[in-house]
Amino acid sequence: MHRGHAFSALTAARAAARVVGRLLLRVEDIDVERCRREFEAAIYDDLAWLGIDWETPVRRQSEHLADYQAALTWLREEDLVYRCFRTRREVLADIGRAPHGPTPAFRGAALDPDDEAQRLEAGEAFAWRLSLDAARRRLGQAWDRLTFDEQGAGPGGEHGAITAEPQSLGDVILARKGLGVAYHLAVVVDDAAQGVTHVVRGEDLFQAAHIQRLLQALLDLPTPTYQHHRLILGPDGKRYAKRDRAQTLAEIRASGATAEAVWRELGFLD
């Protein structure tokens, strides 16, 4: 974890304490190639050092794959998803050719059955994409009434009752062949299973709430309240990120700094 993670964790802990609520920690470890138990243990060490307590046992997504597959199977049976064989490069090329707006999102459709069968027989890789067209037909007028409550703020200052605009993300990927389900589907299933009432996370995930609200409607799941918070920036003006080798809490701890110093630096102590 780095300072950005610490800010998010402390924000969630404070939000839970304010209403005498339950603080839940979830380990999103579906990506088996990148997720390792030693990384998970390091997260626990960092949170404990910060003075944060959470409920146990922790929900680990890798232990609930059947739950996500059940949701995906239902979406498949209801023809709300389709197999997409396009590569990332092909998707980006399609988006670039689209004439609708400065940042268009990918929209596709199922292949002709014969063509799809040939590709499957050839063993081509594919992803299951949520069909926004099918979802709109399923929801009818309810599509226009999809909203969620934002108690924090989106990157544009969005606050309060927000009209969901899932079309802004296009036909998102919900699962890949051989790699399990994707973030959007897994978290809405988790939130419902854990009885989550408030989701606290960074404003970089604000757009995700739009597509997650749609999935909640399709799967008849409850919608939590969202609290998106600002992102912590480093001295270079960029947000802290693992890919930029941001200083970790373990490194800060090893330098002799105290958790109180991190609290104060992040604005949680006067």
Image (tube, rainbow, N blue to C red):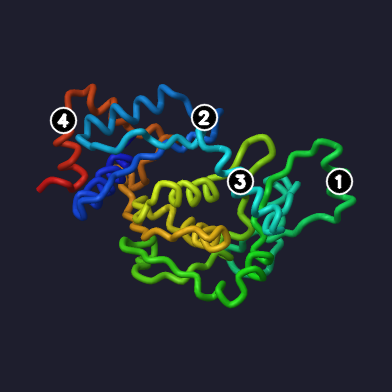
Instruction: Name the residue rendered at 27%, 46% in the picture.
Output: 22
Question: Which residue has dot 2 on it?
Answer: 34
Q: Which amino acid, mark 2?
A: Arg
Q: Earlier in the sequence, mark 2 or mark 1?
A: 2
Residue 236 in the image: state x and y as whole percent: 33, 43
Question: Which residue has dot 1 on it?
Answer: 117
Q: Which amino acid, mark 1?
A: Ala
Q: Earlier in the sequence, mark 3 or mark 1?
A: 3
Report the Cα–Cα distance between label 3 and label 2. 24 Å
Report the Cα–Cα distance between label 2 and label 1. 32 Å
Examine the rendered structure and indicate whether residue 110 appears above or below residue 24.
Answer: below
Residue 150 in the image: state x and y as whole percent: 36, 64
Of the numbered discs in the image, which one, if any, rests on residue 70?
Answer: 3
Circle 4 — which element?
Answer: loop
Q: Are marks 4 and 1 in contact (CB under 8 Å)?
A: no
Examine the rendered structure and indicate whether residue 127 appears above or below residue 41.
Answer: below
Q: Earlier in the sequence, mark 3 or mark 2?
A: 2
Circle 3 — which element?
Answer: helix
Question: Which residue has dot 4 on it?
Answer: 258
Instruction: Name the residue rendered at 85%, 37% in the picture.
Output: 122
Q: Are marks 2 and 4 in contact (CB under 8 Å)?
A: no
Circle 2 — which element?
Answer: loop
Q: Residues within 10 Å of mark 2 (few under 14, many from 20)?
A: few
